[in-house]
Image: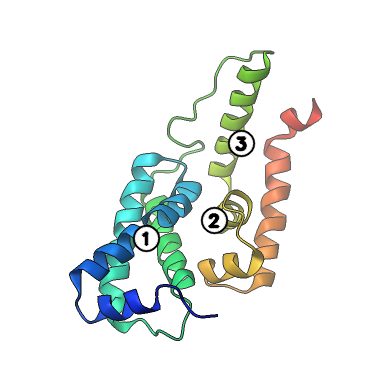
Amino acid sequence: MADPDRDLIAKAKSGDRAARERLVRAHRHDVYRITCAILGDHDDAQDATQEALVRMLRGLSSFDERRDFRAWLRRIAVNCAINVLRSRPDETELPGASPAASNPGGAAQAQEMQRAVRRALARLPERQRVAMSLFGLQEMDLRATAEAMGCAEGTVKSHLHRARAKLREILSDWLED
């Protein structure tokens, strides 16, 4: 299957500024979705997205056009998000995910569950969190998740299995209701 960005990539590699800008605009949203799913914070995701797009532009000259451009860019986005995760102080919950008072009302309970899930994801080891974010939240298939993480599909399955077990443990109070 031909890469829909092939011509744009070739023009951008040759120094065409307009093509570089179109390439950034075409992929900014997807990169942001990936970084936000991993980081869970708008500001951090914006920073990671910016860094990923800068790295994409810098690395474009050495990009092998026989490779899948989107997979290559997803990998850059994942790496940038991981770098932000590593720079954070140890935390057990994501920014803005503080617990709220328990409320039996449907909407309030759903919001509290979402906060609990975000806090639980934040407690996962880095690779498990990335796998869950890409496969579970971004709904990437195993192959795309493995490519983005730079590992084998079996490794992704292992990360997902461990992450699910850990999430069941962390969210056991919610799952018993």
Q: What amino acid type is highlighted by mark number 1? A: Ala
Mark 3 and mark 1 lie on one chain; the one further toward the N terminus is 1
Above or below: residue 65 compared with residue 145 = below
On the image, the x and y values in percent for residue 56 come to: 32, 69
Q: What amino acid type is highlighted by mark number 3? A: Val
Q: What amino acid type is highlighted by mark number 2? A: Val
On the image, the x and y values in percent for residue 41 come to: 42, 40
* Residue drawn at 60 percent across, 24 percent down: 112
* Residue drawn at 34 percent across, 41 percent down: 43
Query: Residue under circle 1?
Result: 26
How many callouts does the rendering have? Answer: 3
Query: Residue under circle 2?
Result: 130
Name the residue nearer the viewer: 172 or 130.
130
Name the residue nearer the viewer: 140 or 19.
19
Above or below: residue 90 compared with residue 17 = above
Q: Quadrant of residue 169?
A: top right
Query: Residue under circle 3?
Result: 117
Position of 75 compared to 49: left or right? right
Q: Foreground mark, 3 or 1? A: 1
Above or below: residue 89 compared with residue 65 = above
On the image, the x and y values in percent for residue 40 come to: 47, 42
